[in-house]
Amino acid sequence: MKKNIKEAIGFHIESTLENDEPIPDVFKNDYRLEFKLSIEALLNAYNDIFTIAALSRITGINERQLWHYASGMRKPRPNQRKRIEEGLHRLGMELLTIDV
């Protein structure tokens, strides 16, 4: 999905330029796409990157509860969504400090 959206934006900019139409202001400078996923979609999209057990260690949320979220059986409360988001952000920040 991300790839398709990026390609569609590129195609839109190219066709706009070819037709001598003005490029929307948002695309004139550097821009960043932000994607908002449900917890279920997030857990399933990245299940080949990190396991439920690893996510449990990162977030402090019980594995069984995370399985319920991933299966769609339960929806996390706002504080649980925040714990998952913050845990993933901490992991991302830690990974950004690594030099190889």
Image (spheres, rainbow, N blue to C red):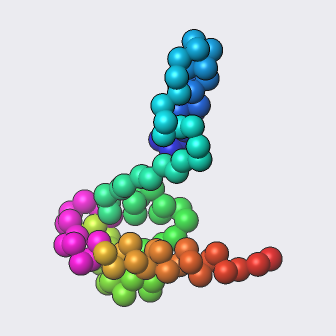
- Please give the name of the residue rendered at 58% of the width and 14% of the height, measured from the top-left corner: 20
Which contiguous range is marked in magenta?
70-81
- Res 54 visible: no
Where residue 52 sits: x, y (%)? 42, 74
- Residue at image position (48%, 31%) is 24
Instruction: Name the residue rendered at 50%, 44% in the picture.
Output: 2
Q: In front here: 62 or 30?
A: 30
In the image, 3 versus 71, the foreground residue is 3
Residue 93 position in % (x across, y down):
56, 78
Residue 13 can be seen, yes or no: yes
Percent x, y of residue 5: 49, 37
Let me know if residue 80 is in the magenta part: yes
* Of the pair 47 and 39, the residue shown nearer to us: 39
In the figure, 27 relative to 98: above or below? above
Q: Is residue 13 magenta?
A: no
Quadrant of the frame with the C terminus: bottom right
Query: Residue 30's x, y, as percent?
Result: 59, 47
Tell me where residue 82 sits by quadrant. bottom left
